[in-house]
Structures are given as C-alpha cells and as structure tokens.
Image (cartoon, grey):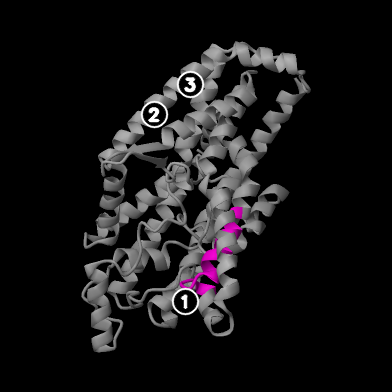
C-alpha cells in the first residue's frame, strides 16, 4: 500500500504542471517569507488591534508620531511583496513552462504578466462615470492556483505556436530581435486569451459571483447553521488552502459576528459562568481555538513533525524560518516553501486532522470537560493562547489544546515520513536525468 502511494505521488510529481508549480514556489519563497515576516510585525506589533501591541502596552509608552510612519512603511513593503504575488507567479509559471519545452521563456513570462493584468482589469460605469482599477483579490495569495494556471496556459501557447530556441546563454541583440518577431503569433493568441479572461472576470464581478460565494461560505461557517455544516465548511477551507485558493490571513470567518456568539457572550456576562451557554457548539470559536494550530490544516503540528523527522537541510531551513510566523497563525510562506500547496501527500491529513480536532473538542464541550470559547482575542494571537483568551483564562482549555496538538503531531509523523521518501526518490530521478 505504501509503495503504491509513493508510486502515485511520484507520477503526480512528474506532471508538467506540478513541476512548473513547484519551481515557481521555490523561486518565490524568499519574497513570500520576507513579506510574511513584515506582515506579522505590522499586524501584531504596530497595529492597535495586534496581539503584541496590546501585550506590550505600546499605547502607554510609545507615540503615534513614529508608529504611524512605521506602519506605512511596513504596509507598503507587505503590499508590494504579497499584494502583487499573482503577477510574480504568472511570470514564473509561464517562464518555467516555456523553458520546459525549449521556447522563448522571457517572452512567455512577460506575455503572462500582460494577460494577468488584462484578466484582473476592472471597468465600471454604474454611477454614470467610467472608472477602472485592478482586481486586487486576483493578484493575492487567495488566487495562487489561478495565477499558476494562467501562466502555465501561456507557456503552453508558446510551446505549440513558437519555434524552439537554442540554449544561448548570452544572446546578442539581433538574436533577441529575431526571437521576438518569430513569437508574434503566440503573443497575439495570448492577448486574445487575456481579453476573454478579462471579459469573463468583469461579468463575474458585475454579477458579484465571487462575493456571493464568499458570503455564503461565511454565513454557513460563522453564522447560525448546524455544527455539521460548519464542520464541512471548515474542511472545505482546508481543501481551498491546499489548492492555493485561500489566503491564510483571510478574515472570512471571525469571532463576534453571529447571533450564536452574541447569545453565548450575553449568557456568560449575566451568569458569570462559561458552561451551559445556549450554543455550546459554536463552530468558529471551536475551529479557531482547537483546529487552527499555526494555520489552516494545523500547520504548526506539520512543521514540528518535519523538525522531528526530516534530516534534509532544505526542509529544516523552511521549518526554522517559518517557526515564528506559523506560531502566529500565518502559514503562507511555509505552504509555499515546502511546498504543501498541491502536494497530494498532505491533502487528506490537512482535511481530516482539523476535523478530528473539532469533533474531539465538541465532545469535550458537551461533557463539560472544557467550556465553549466566547471571548474575542487580538489579531495575531499565538496558537495556544487563543483558547486561553477565548475562555477567559481557563487552564483546562489550554491543557486540552496542548494535548490535541500533540495528537496532531503524532498523526502527521507517518505523512511526513512518506513525503520524505517521495522527496528522496524524486532527487534520485532528477540525478539520473542530469547524467543522461
């Protein structure tokens, strides 16, 4: 069975789209890592609703005259590194796809950027005045898979419509000019694709399709729906994160925005008891406290499992550099650096482990082993303090969360071992290809 899983995973890993995706992630990782670190400093330390800002009482001994410019600089760097990530991804995906088939890779990359900008271009005259802008959601981490797909598609257009290029490391101007002229056909076809995508995205925006889907998921996950519905929505979130269609810092689901939460909080404040609240299985609070250790899919447990099992320096570097970001529930760089996104080895574990946590937590709440978390917490609160703050300092909840976390690590260990075996086999295959 294990050998069968390894063989399927290796065959999947050798697919051209996956090879392009992983090469794109590897190139992009340093920029995402720096952006994530800046984001953590900005949201946790510099913003008034941040965890470190409140814990360190920065408002009492610092001045906004120097905090404000720091926020502006941090936001600027964060937006440049993470807000335009779709452009970087589409360039690299088109570049590596064209390189895979010995086509004009630089031209493919630039064409990919143009197509991505055309697809994200928004025009409107609803108010009677024409205006245009970019759909920033399309360019964010939330649409990583879409950016990859567009870049790969443009690379394939160059594969089929452009001539093969020689492996000249330092081509002269005349050779570059000749290549550009020979690639006019794939560029034109790509621009037509960009127009079609742009029209489609504008229609989707006009009918608010994307917003409707997000609103529906938010209502099901954070509203007054049945616990099983909420559990299924949270499992869907894990799947979207694995696909690269969910921003790990997204605020789709937040505490304090449902009738259930308000009823629970009112009960606690009036009865001075955390137990016997009207809605004990409040999905978002249980999910945030016991199923998001380090991010979607219990990322911190996966990271610790890698530290315990892996001996490969590249894996340990990724884990070490992401320890603090993941501790503050920001797993974006870890998902790209390993990578976890589009990695079939981690798919089932990412979906099932948080679901197991929620079911165990729900059982513990129903037998009054732990109370239902009802209090809101500052933005960026570290993993194990979420349950502590949410239950107003209940130590049983913290101990329960730590035990769940240890169980998560144990469940991730065999998954990580399979991944390391697959990684070693891929390295051997790559070495054989290089020797041929």
Marks 3,1: beta carbons within 8 A: no
Tell me the magenta residue range. Answer: 35-52
Q: Earlier in the sequence, mark 1 or mark 2?
A: 2
Q: Callout 1 environment at 10 Å: few (<14), some (14 to 19), or many (20+)?
A: some
Label 3 crowd (10 A; few <14 / some 14-19 / many >=20): many
Left/right placement of residue 218 relative to residue 70 reads: left
Measure the C-alpha gap from mark 3 to mark 2: 10 Å
Instruction: Give the quarter of the image for residue 424.
Output: top right
Quadrant where the image shows the C terminus:
top right
| The disc label shown at residue 378, or none | none
SS type, badge 1: helix
The quadrant holding residue 171 is top right
**Residue 302 left/right relative to 250:** right
Q: Dot 2 corresponds to which residue?
A: 197
Comes first in the chain, label 3 or label 2: 3
Question: Is residue 43 inside the magenta stretch?
Answer: yes
Quarter of the image for residue 95 reads: top right
Q: Count the marks: how many? A: 3
Depth check, mark 3 against mark 1: the one in front is 3
Whole-percent x and y of residue 427? 69, 35
Q: Can residue 15 be seen in this view?
A: no
Position above or below: 187 against 380: above
The crowd level at tag 2 (other Cα within 10 Å; few <14, some 14-19, many 20+) is some
- The disc placed on residue 190 is 3
Task: Give coordinates of residue 38: x percent, y percent.
Answer: 59, 60
């Amino acid at each position: 069975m294990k050998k069968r899983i390894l063989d399927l995973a290796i065959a999947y890993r050798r697919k051209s789209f996956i090879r392009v995706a992983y090469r794109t992630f590897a190139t992009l990782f340093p920029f995402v890592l720096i952006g994530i670190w800046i984001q953590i400093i900005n949201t946790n330390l510099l913003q008034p609703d941040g965890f470190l800002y409140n814990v360190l009482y920065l408002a009492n001994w610092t001045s906004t005259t120097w905090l404000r410019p720091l926020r502006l600089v941090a936001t600027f760097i964060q937006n440049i590194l993470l807000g335009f990530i779709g452009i970087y991804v589409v360039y690299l995906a088109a570049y590596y796809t064209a390189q895979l088939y010995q086509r004009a890779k630089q031209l493919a990359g630039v064409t990919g950027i143009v197509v991505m900008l055309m697809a994200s271009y928004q025009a409107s005259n609803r108010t009677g005045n024409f205006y245009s802008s970019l759909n920033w959601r399309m360019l964010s981490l939330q649409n990583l898979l879409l950016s990859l797909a567009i870049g790969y598609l443009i690379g394939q257009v160059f594969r089929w419509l452009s001539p093969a290029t020689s492996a000249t490391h330092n081509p002269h101007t005349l050779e570059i000019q000749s290549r550009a002229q020979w690639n006019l056909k794939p560029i034109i076809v790509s621009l037509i694709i960009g127009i079609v995508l742009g029209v489609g995205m504008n229609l989707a925006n006009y009918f608010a399709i994307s917003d409707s889907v997000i609103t529906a998921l938010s209502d099901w996950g954070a509203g007054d729906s049945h616990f099983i519905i909420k559990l299924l929505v949270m499992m869907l979130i894990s799947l979207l994160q694995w696909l690269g269609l969910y921003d790990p810092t997204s605020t789709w689901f937040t505490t304090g925005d449902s009738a259930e939460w308000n009823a629970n909080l009112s009960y606690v404040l009036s009865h001075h008891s955390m137990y016997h609240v009207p809605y004990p299985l409040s999905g978002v609070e249980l999910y945030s406290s016991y199923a998001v250790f380090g991010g979607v899919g219990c990322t911190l447990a996966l990271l610790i499992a890698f530290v315990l099992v892996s001996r490969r320096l590249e894996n340990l570097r990724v884990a070490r550099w992401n320890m603090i970001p993941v501790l503050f529930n920001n797993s974006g760089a870890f998902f790209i650096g390993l990578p976890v996104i589009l990695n079939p080895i981690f798919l089932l574990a990412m979906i099932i482990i948080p679901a197991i946590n929620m079911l165990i937590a729900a059982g513990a709440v129903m037998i009054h082993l732990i109370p239902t978390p009802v209090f809101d917490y500052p933005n960026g609160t570290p993993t194990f303090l979420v349950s502590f703050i949410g239950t107003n300092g209940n130590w049983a909840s913290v101990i329960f969360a730590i035990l769940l976390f240890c169980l998560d690590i144990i469940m991730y260990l065999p998954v990580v071992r399979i991944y390391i075996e697959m990684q070693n086999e891929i390295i051997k295959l790559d070495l054989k290809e290089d020797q041929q």
